[in-house]
Amino acid sequence: MNKKLKELIELPEDSLTSEDDERLVEELKKAELIMPIEVISTDEDESFEFKPLKISNPDNQEFIPVFSDEDELVKAHVEFEVINITSENLAEMISDDECFGIALNPFSKYSLAIPLNEFIKIFK
């Protein structure tokens, strides 16, 4: 799951080229991610409702954590419900959110934080 995306995230920052950046955006566009959620409603008569979990950095900026694969999820020791979601659906879902951005593989040595407006622009 998302092998190329993960490889691009793991490239040393000082050696990234503009071509690498373009490839990263292309891989992100077609990625299916794993997102921890808080279930709001599971009533059988209602639709399934949830909201994404959020984490904060030391500057108190909130991010929605997402993971490229099961291995990254395990590293995070996530003990919440999760869903698989395409990047495009995620962008649609959080376009009105007030968080700072998304954090891809936030508990990994190789993670990527993307400001919300930049993430949403990828899909416009």
Image: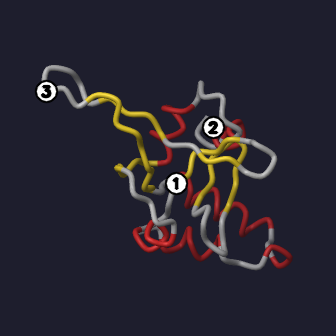
Question: Disc 2 residue type?
Answer: Ile
Number of other residues with Cα within 10 Å of mark 2, as a class: few under 14, some 14 to 19, many 20 or more: some
Question: Disc 1 residue type?
Answer: Val
Q: Residue at x 38, y 52 (%)?
A: 80
Position of 1 relative to 91 (above/below): below
User: Residue 97 at what x, y percent from top left?
Assistant: 60, 28
Residue annotated with mark 2? 120
Sequence order check, earlier mark of 1 and 3? 3
Residue annotated with mark 1? 66
Residue 27, located in which quarter of the rendered image? Answer: bottom right
Which marked residue is nearer to the observer: mark 1 or mark 3? 3
Which numbered disc covers residue 44? Answer: 3
Position of 88 relative to 107 (above/below): above
Disc 1 vs disc 3: Cβ atoms closer than 8 Å? no
Residue most toward the top? 45
Q: Residue at x 80, y 73 (%)?
A: 13
Sequence order check, earlier mark of 3 and 2? 3
Q: Residue at x 48, y 40 (%)?
A: 52
Which marked residue is nearer to the observer: mark 1 or mark 2? 1
Give the left or right position of residue 44, taking residue 10 as reference. left
User: Residue 110 at what x, y percent from top left?
Assistant: 66, 72
Question: Disc 3 residue type?
Answer: Glu
Which numbered disc covers residue 32? Answer: none
Say which element carries label 1. strand
